[in-house]
Amino acid sequence: MARRPLAERRRQLTEAAIRAMTRDGVPATTTRSIAAEAGVSLSVVHYCFDSKQALLESVIEAITEHYTGVVKEAIRPAGSLRETVRAGFQAYWDHVSARPGEHLLTYELTQYALRRPGFGHLARRQYELYTATYAELIEQLRADMGFGLRVPVPLLARYLAAMTDGLTLNFLVLGDADAAAEMLDAVTEQVLAMTVPAAPGPAAAPPPPASPPCAPSR
């Protein structure tokens, strides 16, 4: 087995854990099955993660990073604020549609953490991370497009985290893509209602009056 930096090995094991848990479920996934998925010895898993809690936290962070990256790219200003916000939601939704098992895993992780003594902080960390991610995206968009907000950023971030979390679970249960698209349109309009257009900059000073032509000398 080739030597790798610890951070790289942790990423490898985290992605292997995501694949194994998506396929087999959280309770059925063991450190041994993760090692087999990654093609490493069991001792490597224990060296990189000193507890299952640490491994699960890494999984939660990695899944969040998977869709955050595509959303950040999508909300680069390329039109109106409405178009940009809707594009961000669409990028997230494309990720849900392409990787439903990975998003189902996030709910399994929450349930697992809440039901297992000593793991409850992981569920709290998971939802705090969702809110922090939305706050970062909001601030990025504000910096790029210069709009104001009628509500504090933390409140809007919590609102968006709750809305997309509920909508994702609804889609995973019902599988209604058309209804999901309508909801994303509605959430976009709700977000816009909480924004304030950027104040116009100071008007340019009028040009000085033209000097009168000089009278011809006699």
Image: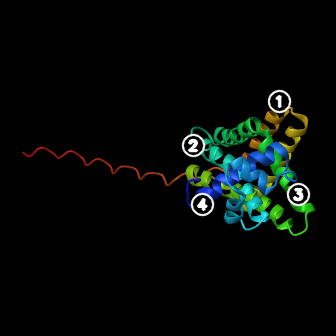
Position of residue 147 in the picture relative to residue 161 (left or right): left
Displayed quadrant of residue 168: top right
Q: How is the image coloured?
A: rainbow
Query: Which dot, 2 or 3, sits closer to the camera?
Result: 3
Displayed quadrant of residue 171: top right
Position of residue 25 in the picture relative to residue 95 (left or right): right
Q: Residues within 10 Å of mark 4 (few under 14, many from 20)?
A: few
Q: Residues within 10 Å of mark 2 (few under 14, many from 20)?
A: some
Work out whether 49 lies above or below 180: below
Query: Which dot, 2 or 1, sits closer to the camera?
Result: 1
Residue 158, numbered circle: none
Query: Element type at marker 3?
Result: helix
Between the C-alphas of marks 4 and 1, the distance is 41 Å
Residue 77, numbered circle: 2
Query: Element type at marker 1?
Result: helix
Which residue in the protein does label 1 denote? 178
Which residue in the protein does label 3 denote? 112
As drawn, the residue found furthest toward the left would be 218
Which residue in the protein does label 4 denote? 7
Query: Which dot, 1 or 3, sits closer to the camera?
Result: 3
Query: Which dot, 2 or 4, sits closer to the camera?
Result: 4
Q: Residues within 10 Å of mark 3 (few under 14, many from 20)?
A: some
Between the C-alphas of marks 2 and 1, the distance is 26 Å
Closer to the N terminus: mark 4 or mark 3?
A: 4
Position in image of residue 184 (x %, y %): 78, 39
Amino acid type, residue under disc 3 in the picture: Tyr
Q: Residues within 10 Å of mark 1 (few under 14, many from 20)?
A: few
